Amino acid sequence: MIAGIGTDLCRVSRMKRAAGSDYFVRRVFSNEEINYARAQGEPARHFASAFAAKEALAKASGLGMFGMGLCESWVRRTETGPVMLMSDSLREKLKGRGAGRCWLSLTHEGDYALAFVVLESSE
């Protein structure tokens, strides 16, 4: 059963400007996300998709970004696709809202990165 759905669209050019600030990058992204993005040919695309994933999770959970926290979740790229990881405290908040597993899809097209999150019920 679906416990929540969220999507977010992030403009890559906007993230390119924002990611020029190391303070912003360190405040928003995990070391894993930073290292992955900076190892790619166009880091802003990957920062944008990770940011969109955080926003999509915030919407799917109903917590919002301030209720969730920017660094409480992060994207890991795997051989089978991206996965959303989260802190124990965020996992507990989601569990309290009846959400268990998190499904994540990311895509890039031109100047946009899009994330789609589905939270599956823990029941």
Image (tube, grey):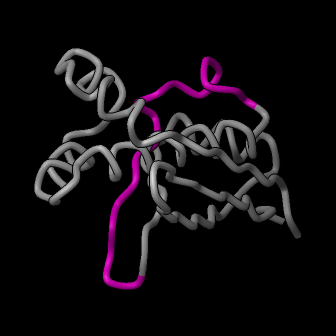
Tell me where residue 23 sits by quadrant.
Answer: top left
In this image, 60 relative to 41: left or right? right
68 is within the stretch colored magenta: yes
> Foreground: 88 or 18?
18
Q: Tell me residue 73's x, y (percent).
A: 46, 42
In this image, 53 relative to 13: left or right? right
Q: Is residue 106 above or below residue 4?
A: below
Q: Is residue 54 above or below residue 65?
A: below
Q: Tell me residue 101's x, y (percent).
A: 65, 64
Q: Which residues are magenta?
A: 63-80
Residue at 60%, 38% (x, y): give it. 55
Tell me where residue 119 sits by quadrant.
Answer: bottom right
Q: Identify the image quadrant of the N terminus.
A: bottom right
Q: Tell me residue 82's x, y (percent).
A: 43, 68
> Foreground: 44 or 37?
44
Q: Tell me residue 61's x, y (percent).
A: 74, 41
Q: Identify the image quadrant of the C terminus.
A: bottom right
Q: Is residue 67 above or below residue 74?
A: above
Residue at 53%, 48% (x, y): give it. 53
Q: Residue furthest bottom?
A: 80
> Foreground: 70 or 110?
110
Q: Residue furthest right?
A: 1
